[in-house]
Amino acid sequence: MKIYTKTGDSGETSLFSGKRVSKSNSRIKAYGTVDELNSFIGLLKDSINDELISKDLLLIQNNLFVLGSILASDINNNKLDSIEESDITDIEKLIDEMEKELPRLKNFLIPGGNVIVSYCQVCRTITRRTERICVELSKDEEIDLKLIIYLNRLSDYFFILSRFLSKKLDIIEIKWKGRKKI
């Protein structure tokens, strides 16, 4: 089987139902951005030398495939996996465990200081963009609110992970002090 089908050459693609839509459709933007996020998480995971965090990231990647498949379906498809409350609470538990080891944050942080920490921040911002696209989609079409909640928690996870890895790798967090203090 060839990877190219030529069916998307006119700027349209198919949802799981077979319905043809423009590649600029909000649903396509949403699951395309989930795919982009998943790729960056793979890059982050491949850069980290921590088995436990890598395992957590793999679980997140699996959840993002679930999320993407839901977004790629324009009908309520009971055969698809779904994002569950437990997926959200699992992310919250990971955040809470890491946050226990971090000093209280009193400033905004400037992303950077280490490539791995920067990858976390890139994942955070792509997650935020994905969330915004899903919120936009929810204005026109019915989508499960748990998808948006999961993405919201996931962006928090990547922020805390960046701080946690900064501490673990002994990287000084770059605090934003405003323009007058540069």
Image: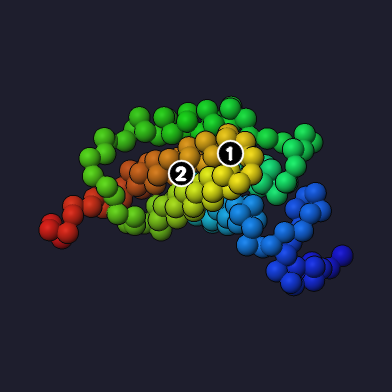
* Quadrant containing the N terminus in the rendered view: bottom right
Q: Position of residue 45 (x, y in %)?
A: 53, 50
Q: Dot 1 surroundings within 10 Å: few (below 14), some, or many (20 or more)?
A: many
For marks 1 and 2, give the CA distance: 13 Å
8 or 119, nearer to the observer: 8
Q: Position of residue 125 (x, y in %)?
A: 44, 52
Q: Which residue is mark 1?
A: 147
121 or 9, nearer to the observer: 9
Choose mark 1 or mark 2, whichever is in front. Answer: 1
**Residue 69 placement, left or right of 40:** right
Q: Which residue is mark 2?
A: 155
Q: Residue 42, which numbered label?
A: none
Q: Residue furthest left?
A: 180
The residue under the point 41% across, 29% down is: 96
Residue 166, can we see it?
yes
**Residue 178 placement, left or right of 85:** left
